[in-house]
Structure formats: structure tokens, C-alpha cells
Image: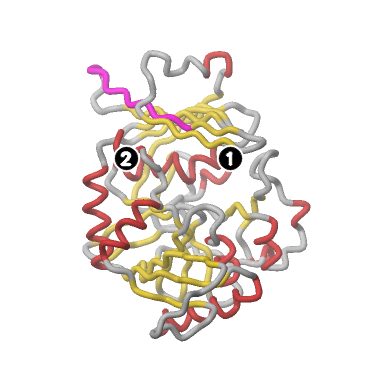
């Protein structure tokens, strides 16, 4: 078992392993581990075709994630079998209060998938919104960066951490609603970063970092002062969600003041569409019968949280100005 399971994740404590000292939690689940038998892995859900499947094929890797919903009569509540067939292989069997992790002991560890898609499935089934986003703490509030993979979230996160910002979550953000407020709880103090992002924080130990998996350039970094980051381990109220729009050139309008970075407030309709496009579970919500519920929750979110779009020039030489523009926006 990865020792990260001892730390609360997105406000969730994994019993019986989680150490609750000095941490605030919102919910808890029971988690059990067993070793996966690869000989039976391909037949693990042979009784029924998956209700949802997602494939990602690169030059050197293939990732397949599938979901099977088990609604047999002898079960009081449905079981959700999330099958991971990637550089790591295993099953998350998810029910109302439990997650069973059956994992192959070679390849990428279960924690890599649990902290995003595995726990996100349990959270969404329990009516807690999850978004593909990085969350950062700034003074008494949290902000979020939303963008597809490889379009700037982590790079901008690294740049802001040169100032008063601290990392809260990497790649996935859970929104715990309290009346009209949304509270962000920290994820585990680890992140996956591209080598060029690590150069922004002048990390001197890039070669010593472990790869996410052998066919992938991203590396795993512990979030702490020695790695060039601060980590916030306390929940914060969400203030602003920034939709990132990194461009090669800015087509300036009359109301724009910068040739490098401009921030505009999105309409509610546009904000909802962009948040739907950046969901953490892709198209699985239809199979889960959660599409309508999630649409209404996102509509409520954009009524109560400012959703801004940042349009900024691509290039490391512009990052300092982008950082200052965001700080100015938050202070106004």
C-alpha cells in the first residue's frame, strides 16, 4: 500500500489507514487492498460489456479505462467496477461506503489513478462535483486553473508559486458545496510535471525524479519548499475559476489593455459549457445517469463563483506578467 493513502484526499479519509491528526476531513470511506491476478484480469468483468470505455493511444503506450455497473438484485446498492489497463493494471470496485483496490504489483501504483479518476467516480456518485483543474491557495481563498492536458495548467501553477500561492490539488479538484460557497480540500502533496515545467522553478534534481511511467516524460515531484513549492493542507473557499486560453498571438480588442495577458469574465452559458468540456470523467456521466444532475450543479456553481478566462501569450518570457495580471485581478 502506498503511504499516501494515510493522508486525506480531497476531503476524504481512507479508513483504516488515514492519519487524521492535523487534517480536516469532510467524509470517509473504507478502503481495502488485494493483489491482482493478471491471469484473471482480462476476464474480470466478462459477464457483461462495459457501460463506458475510454481509450488513449500514444506512440509508446495505450491506456484503456472502462466502467461496468453491477446492479444485481442481491446487492443493496449498485457496484461500479472501474478497470484500469494502462501502465498500471487493476480494478477499483466502488460502492456506497467502500472502495476495494485490486492491483498488480508491477507498473504504475494504484495511487496514481485513485487520486484522480478513482476517487472522482466515488465523489460524483455522492453528488460532489469534480473538475479537471489545478487548485491553488492564495491568502484566505482558493483559485483554480481549468484547461485540457498540455495547455498550461501546471506551467502556470509553477509560475504562481514563485509568489504567495501554494498548491492545493494537481489535475483534479473536488468542490464541496456549503450553501452558496464551495470549499476546496487539498489533494496529496505530490504532482506530475513535465520536465520543461520543472525548469521554471529551477528544480536541480530533475534527473533523480521518478517518471509517472517509463513511456511517459512526466515526473512525480513531492510538493514542498525544497522542491520549489508551498503546499496548503487546509481547506479554502473557492474564489475564482480561471479558464486558460494560451495563444500564439493576441487579437486585441478596444477594451483590452495588454499585449501579453487579458482577463475577461465569462457569461454563465459559456462558463458551463467549458466546465462540462473539462470534466474529469469524460463521457462517463451518461452511463452513470448523472448528466442532468451535473448540468444543474454546474449552473449553480457559475452563479456563485466568478468564472474568468485568461487569454495569454505562449512563452516562458511572458509568465511573470501573466502572474502579476492574475494577482491584480484577485486584489481588485
Q: Are marks 2 and 1 in contact (CB under 8 Å)?
A: no
Q: Nearer the viewer, residue 224 or 134?
A: 134
Q: Nearer the viewer, residue 182 or 198?
A: 198
The mark nearer the N terminus, 2 or 1, is 1
Q: Considering the numbered disc 2 on the image, is that residue within a helix, a strand or a loop?
A: helix
Residue 76 sits above or below residue 171 on the image: above
Residue 118 sits above or below residue 219 on the image: above
Q: Which residue is mark 2?
A: 285
Q: Which residue is mark 1?
A: 2
Kindly report the secondary structure that dominates the magenta region of the rendered protein: strand
Q: Position of residue 2 (x, y in %)?
A: 58, 40
CA gap between label 2 and label 1 equals 29 Å
Q: Nearer the viewer, residue 47 or 19?
A: 47
Q: Considering the numbered disc 1 on the image, is that residue within a helix, a strand or a loop?
A: loop
Taking the spot 25% from the left edge, 37% from the top edge, the residue there is 289
Residue 70: in magenta span: yes
Judged left or right of residue 43, residue 230 is: right
Judged left or right of residue 79, residue 61 is: right
Q: Position of residue 313 (x, y in %)?
A: 56, 72
Judged left or right of residue 255, residue 319 is: right
Amino acid at each position: 500500500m502506498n503511504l499516501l493513502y494515510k493522508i486525506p484526499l480531497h476531503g476524504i479519509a481512507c479508513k483504516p489507514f488515514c492519519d487524521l491528526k492535523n487534517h480536516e476531513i469532510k467524509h470517509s470511506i473504507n478502503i481495502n487492498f488485494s493483489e491482482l491476478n493478471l491471469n484473471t484480469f482480462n476476464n474480470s468483468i466478462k459477464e457483461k460489456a462495459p457501460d463506458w470505455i475510454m481509450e488513449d493511444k500514444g506512440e509508446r503506450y495505450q491506456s484503456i479505462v472502462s466502467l461496468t455497473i453491477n446492479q444485481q438484485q442481491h446487492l443493496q446498492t449498485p457496484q461500479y467496477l472501474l478497470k484500469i489497463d494502462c501502465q498500471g493494471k487493476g480494478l477499483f470496485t466502488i460502492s456506497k461506503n467502500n472502495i476495494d483496490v485490486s492491483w498488480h504489483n508491477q507498473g504504475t501504483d494504484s495511487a496514481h489513478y485513485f487520486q484522480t479518476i478513482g476517487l472522482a467516480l466515488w465523489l460524483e456518485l455522492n453528488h460532489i462535483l469534480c473538475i479537471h483543474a489545478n487548485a491553488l491557495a492564495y491568502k484566505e481563498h482558493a483559485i483554480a486553473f481549468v484547461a485540457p492536458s498540455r495547455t498550461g495548467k501546471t506551467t502556470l501553477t509553477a509560475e504562481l508559486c514563485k509568489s504567495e500561492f501554494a498548491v492545493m490539488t494537481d489535475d483534479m479538484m473536488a468542490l464541496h458545496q456549503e450553501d452558496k460557497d464551495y470549499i476546496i480540500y487539498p489533494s496529496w502533496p505530490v504532482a506530475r510535471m513535465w520536465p520543461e515545467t520543472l525548469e521554471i522553478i529551477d528544480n536541480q534534481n530533475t534527473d533523480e525524479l521518478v517518471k509517472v511511467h517509463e513511456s511517459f516524460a512526466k515526473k512525480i515531484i513531492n510538493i514542498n519548499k525544497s522542491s520549489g513549492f508551498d503546499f496548503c493542507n487546509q481547506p479554502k473557499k473557492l474564489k475564482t475559476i480561471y479558464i486558460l486560453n494560451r495563444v500564439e498571438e493576441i487579437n486585441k480588442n478596444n477594451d483590452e489593455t495588454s499585449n501579453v495577458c487579458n482577463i475577461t469574465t465569462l457569461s454563465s452559458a459559456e462558463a458551463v459549457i467549458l466546465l462540462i468540456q473539462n470534466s474529469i470523467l469524460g463521457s462517463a456521466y451518461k452511463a452513470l445517469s448523472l448528466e442532468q444532475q451535473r448540468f444543474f450543479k454546474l449552473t449553480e456553481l457559475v452563479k456563485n463563483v466568478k468564472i474568468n478566462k485568461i487569454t495569454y501569450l505562449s512563452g516562458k518570457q511572458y509568465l511573470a506578467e501573466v502572474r502579476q495580471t492574475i494577482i491584480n485581478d484577485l486584489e481588485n
